[in-house]
Image (spheres, rainbow, N blue to C red):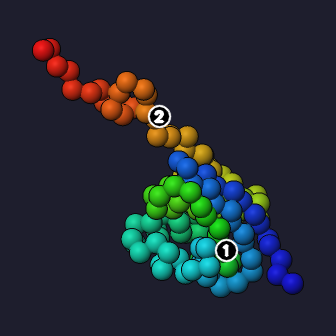
Amino acid sequence: MIKNLGIGTGRRKNAVARVYLRDGNGKITINGRDLRNYFPQGEHVLIVRQPLLVTASENKFDVLINVYGGGSNGQAGACRHGLARALCQVDEGNYTSLRAKGYLTRDSRMVERKKYGQAGARRRFQFSKR
């Protein structure tokens, strides 16, 4: 039986990530695919791995992530948030370093909704005098 050492839920924009930490050697799996396969952009790979680098635990745990909703940016941010929460669950000593970097803070910025009578959230339809 595989034992989860830490579980964390991360959110960013409309993306939600469930993160499971297990004993291992640093393999990160997202939705059944390898990290670099799931996020081809190197920038997103770095975002996901940041909490592991800060806590110096890149090769201590295998990370299993289920993520859904949003786009690639939101999903990468959600994975980082969930991973940071899971690392805090494993070792309370990680809390201060992760908090200082801002990885435990839920980024509350969301897309503003479109209003009726307008082209978008803030954009108006073109004004015609005649």
* On screen, residue 63 above or below 80: below
Which residue ends up furthest to the top in the rendered image?
129
> Which residue position is annotated with label 1?
64
Quadrant occupied by the N terminus = bottom right
Secondary structure at badge 2 equals: loop
Which residue ends up furthest to the front in the rendered image?
130
In the image, what residue occupies the spot 53% across and 48% down? Answer: 13
User: What is the number of callouts on the image?
Assistant: 2
Q: Position of residue 100 (x, y in %)?
A: 57, 49
Q: Are marks 1 and 2 in contact (CB under 8 Å)?
A: no
Secondary structure at badge 1 equals: strand
In the picture provided, is 113 more to the left or to the right than 95?
Answer: left
* On screen, residue 72 above or below 62: above
- The crowding category of the residue bearing disc 1, from other C-alpha atoms within 10 Å (few below 14, some 14 to 19, many at least 20), is many
Frontmost residue, 128 versus 25 = 128
Callout in the foreground (1, 2): 2
> Which residue position is annotated with label 2?
113
Residue type of the residue flagged with mark 1: Leu
Q: Is residue 93 visible?
A: no
In the picture provided, is 54 more to the left or to the right than 120?
Answer: right
Q: CA distance from mark 1 to mark 2?
A: 33 Å
Q: Position of residue 46 (x, y in %)?
A: 46, 68
